[in-house]
Image (cartoon, rainbow, N blue to C red):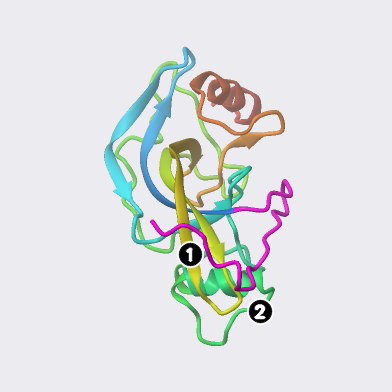
Amino acid sequence: MEEKNRTSELELTFECPKCGGTGVFEHLTNYTNIFVYEDGEIAFGDTEWWESDTAEYSCNECFWTIVDEEDCIIRDEAALIRWLRKEPKTLVPTPSETNGCCDDEERESPDGALDLEPGELRFVCPKCNGNQLDAVNFTATRVFAFDDGSVVYGKVYGGEYEHYRCHACRWKVEDEEHGCFDEPEILVSWLQANCDQSE
C-alpha cells in the first residue's frame, strides 16, 4: 500500500457528523446471517456473502458509514471526493448512486429465518422492520483524498472490525453506551430491550 506523502496537494478534510472524527477508512466487507439465543449463543447461517467489489467509506473513529444527502451509501472514489467537497449529486449517477442506500439487488433469505426456535430472540430493525441479523467483519484501510480527485491508500488498520447489522437495510446495531459492538452478551441485552419478544 502506498503511504501518504503528498503534502504539496490540498488534502480534502473530513469531519464525522456523528463523533467529529477526522479520518476516513475504506472497508471491504463479508457477512453472514446469524441467529441469537437467550443464553448468549449465536448460530451462524449456511450462507456467506462478500461485498469486496463494493467498498464503503466510514469514519475511522466510530465507523459511521458515509452517506449522501439522500442517505445512500458512498461506494466509489468519485462519489467520496464529491461528498468531501460538499458538491451535489451529478445528473449522471455514479455506481454508488445507482445501487444506493440499502441493497437494491435481490438476496435470497436464509431458510427458516423467521421461524424462531425455543430460546431464539427476535430481531426487528428500527429502520426497516427487517427480521434478519448479519454478523459483519471487514478490512479497514486509511484513505486520504485530495482536491485534484486523487485518492491515496495508507496503512491497513486492525485487521478486522466486527459488528451486527440488519440484513435488509444494513442498519448497524448500536446503543448509546457502546456505539457499534461485537459482544454477544451486549447483543442479547439489546434484543431483549429493543425488540418485542412476546410473539
Q: x, y percentage for residue 76?
A: 47, 68
Q: Residue at x 64, y 73 (%)?
A: 10
Reading the image, the residue beneath label 2 is: 88
Residue lying furthest left: 46
Q: Tell me if 19 is positioned left or right of 181 in this view.
A: right
Reading the image, the residue beneath label 1 is: 152
Q: Amino acid at mark 2?
A: Pro
Q: Residue at x 49, y 22 (%)?
A: 184
Q: Amino acid at mark 1?
A: Val
Inspect the magenta stretch and tell me whether residue 33 lies in it. no
Above or below, comparing residue 101 to residue 146 in the picture: above
Nearest to the eye among marks 1 and 2: give it.
Answer: 1
Q: Residue at x 73, y 54 (%)?
A: 17
In-front residue for pair 51/42? 51
Magenta stretch, residue numbers: 1-23
Magenta: main secondary structure equals: loop
Crowd tier of the residue under label 2, counting other residues whose Cα lies within 10 Å: few below 14, some 14–19, many 20 or above? few
Mark 1, secondary structure of its residue: strand
Q: x, y percentage for residue 6?
A: 55, 67
